[in-house]
Amino acid sequence: MSFRTLAGAGALINWIDVPADVEAEFDHWYTFQHLPERVGTPGFARGRRFVAENGSDPGAGRFLALYETDDVDVLDSAPYLERLNAPTDWTRKISATFTFAQRAACSLALSAGQGSAAHVLTAQLDLLDDSGEAFVEHLRKVAVRLTESFDAVSLHLYRNDAEITSAKSRTDEGRVTSAADSVPVWIVVVELARPEAWSAALDEVRAGAEHIRGGADGIGRVGRYRLLVELESADPATAAG
């Protein structure tokens, strides 16, 4: 029997900070307007929102959003760009308050294990592009160790497509979003079976990066997050994967 862990071969990953006095309105906007708007866009299959837990890098972003899409091209498609060029007044207001924002339109390079979890670890990696294939194979072994030890249920490696990621900056919504920062090429997402296993999972990812880089780990910002909200598309074509 096979199980579907991810709903598509593409992903949009966002890390965001807002001022403390904006958080309540930000949560309301994101959960009840922004998340449904994004997941309602053709090609979007699922969206999840997370909040940082102890152990996150202070500069990693307090809030994380993971969207699964049919493929990375959805994030440069006409329906999606139309949404970005017609932001609501509420979206304009909230986006202008961001004190930190990172965004990556990604293609899936590896998915191992099965299932999603309420706790995730994200790690951004600065690896040479030609190291990618070797790192994928090494992470397959890491995923086996993490799942066999019950530390994780699944592990995913995403490759940031810089050209598609940059498409938002040329839209109305992109122009009002403040504090945008770049993202490295590679992003690891570990779905944790045990939330306290985040440190062991990070050690495994770091060891893999060191193995590929010959001693330098290349690990950038690391975030540890807890699930807040999950929303799936009702579109039968998208829901079928």
Image (tube, grey):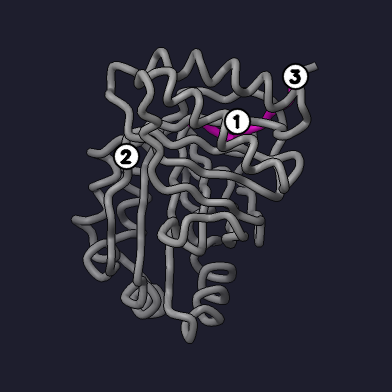
* Amino acid at pointer 3: Ser
Q: Quadrant of residue 75?
A: top left
* Residue ID at (24%, 65%): 172
Q: Position of residue 200 (x, y in %)?
A: 64, 36
Q: Quadrant of the N terminus?
A: top right
Q: Quadrant of the C terminus?
A: top right
Q: Note whether residue 237 is visible.
A: no
Query: Is 140 left, or right, of 78 in this rendering?
Result: right
Range of residues picked out in magenta: 2-9
Disc on the earlier residue, 1 or 3: 3
Q: Does the magenta stretch include residue 4?
A: yes
Q: Name the residue under label 1.
A: 155
Disc on the earlier residue, 2 or 1: 1
Q: Note whether residue 12 is visible.
A: yes
Q: In which quarter of the image is residue 106?
A: top left
Q: Name the residue under label 2.
A: 184
- Gap between marks 1 and 3 measured at Cα: 17 Å
- Gap between marks 2 and 3 measured at Cα: 32 Å
- Gap between marks 2 and 1 measured at Cα: 18 Å
**190 versus 207 height, above or below:** below
Q: Mark 3 points at which residue?
A: 2
